[in-house]
Amino acid sequence: MNPEVRRRAGEAWAFRSRVEQDAARRFRRLSGVISGFDAGSPVPELLQRAAEDEVRHAALCKALAESYGHAAFDAVPEHPIAPSSLDARAAALYEMVAACCITETESMATLATLLAEDAEAPVANVLREIARDEVAHGQMGWAHLAREAERTGVAFLSRFIPSMLAGAAAEGLFSVADAEAESPELLRHGVLPHSTKKRIFVGTLEGVILPGLDRFGIDTRPAQAWLQERL
Amino acid sequence: MLFKKLFQLLVVGGAVIGGASGCSTASSSQQTGKSSPSPSGSATAGSSAPAQGADAGVQGGGVSGW
C-alpha cells in the first residue's frame, strides 16, 4: 500500500474513534437533560442506546486505525458547545441539532457514499456495522427538533447554524487539497478523497439539512450565506 | 438520489419517531413575534429561547464528524 494512503487512512480512523467517544459522552448526558423536561419523549432512550453504539463504534475505529499503524488519539475533555446564554432546554436543542441533525446526518451521507465503493473487507465490515446504527443517530436529532418545534420556539437557532456548520466542517474542507488527498485508493480504506468529501458535505447540507431545518421553521438564510462565502 | 433518500429516512423518519406532525407550528409563529400555546393550551412558547438581547452575537460551536 502507498505509505501516504496508509498514513491518511490510519489518521482518519483514529480521528473517527475519538469522534465516536465524544458522541457517546454527549448522548449519555443529553439523555438525562431531555428526560428532565420531556418525559414523554422517545429521544432519551434512543440517546442511551446510541451512547452504547458509539462506544462500540469507537472500538471498531480504533482497531482499524491500529491496523494501519496509527495509535488512537487521546480522549479530550468534553466542552460545552452551546452558547452560555441559552437555558438548559435551549442548549439541549442546540446540541441535538449540531450533533445529530448536522453532524450525524453528514456522517450518514459519508457512510452511504463509502458503502457504495469497493472497500477492503475489514473496512467494509466496519462501515456496514456503523451505518446500521447511524440512521437512528441522525433520526433522533430530527425527532427532538420536531417535538420542540411543536412545543416551544426553535426559530432562535437560525443565527447559530453557521457556528454549528463551522464546527462540523473538516479543517481545510473548502480549500484546494494536494494530489495525495485526492487519491481514489483512499476509498478502499474508508476515506473519501477531498473533492468527494466536499461534494458530499455540500450536497447533504443543501439537499437534507437545510430543507430539514426549513421544514421546522428555522430560517436557513444565514446558513446559506455561510456556505456561499466558502464555495 | 442519495440526498432525497436521506431526507426521507432521517428528517421525515425522525419526525415520525418524535411523534410530531413533521412541520413547524410554534416556531413559525415565533418568527412573526406571536406567542404560541402548547398543545395542552398552556403558554410555553419561548420558554427555552434565550433571553432577549442576552446573546446578540453568533456564538457556540459545532461537532466534528466523519
Image (spheres, coloured by chain):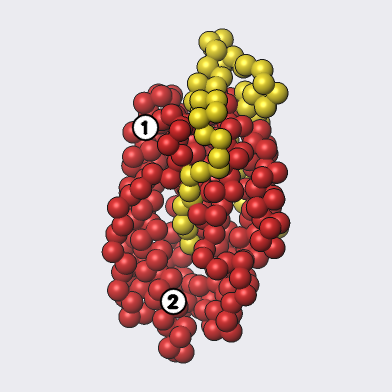
Chain colours: A red, B yellow
Give percent across and percent down for residue A194. Answer: 58, 73
Vertical relation: A45 (above or below) A75: above
Furthest residue in direction bottom, as rendered: A2
Q: Which residue is drawn at 62% across and 75% down?
A: A176
Q: In this view, does A211 lie above or below A175?
A: above
Q: Is residue A100 visible?
A: no
Pinpoint residue A112: horizontal percent, then vertical percent. Answer: 56, 62
Query: Residue at coordinates 52% horizontally, 63% vertically from top-left?
Result: A170
Residue lying at 61% horizontally and 32% vertically, measured from the top left: A155
Amino acid of disc 1 = Val
Sequence order check, earlier mark of 1 and 2:
2
Which of B9 and A39 lies nearest the eye of the viewer?
Answer: A39
Q: Name the residue under label 1.
A: A33
Residue A122 falls left or right of residue B8: left
Under tag 2, what secondary structure? helix
Q: How crowded is mark 2: few (under 14 residues within 10 Å), some or many (20 or more)?
A: many
Label 2 sits on what residue type? Ala
Tell me which residue sits at (42%, 83%) in the image: A6
**Residue A222: which numbered mark, if any?**
none
Which disc number belongs to residue A9? Answer: 2
Q: Which residue extends farthest top? A: B41
Return the x and y of residue B20 as percentages of the image width and height.
58, 28
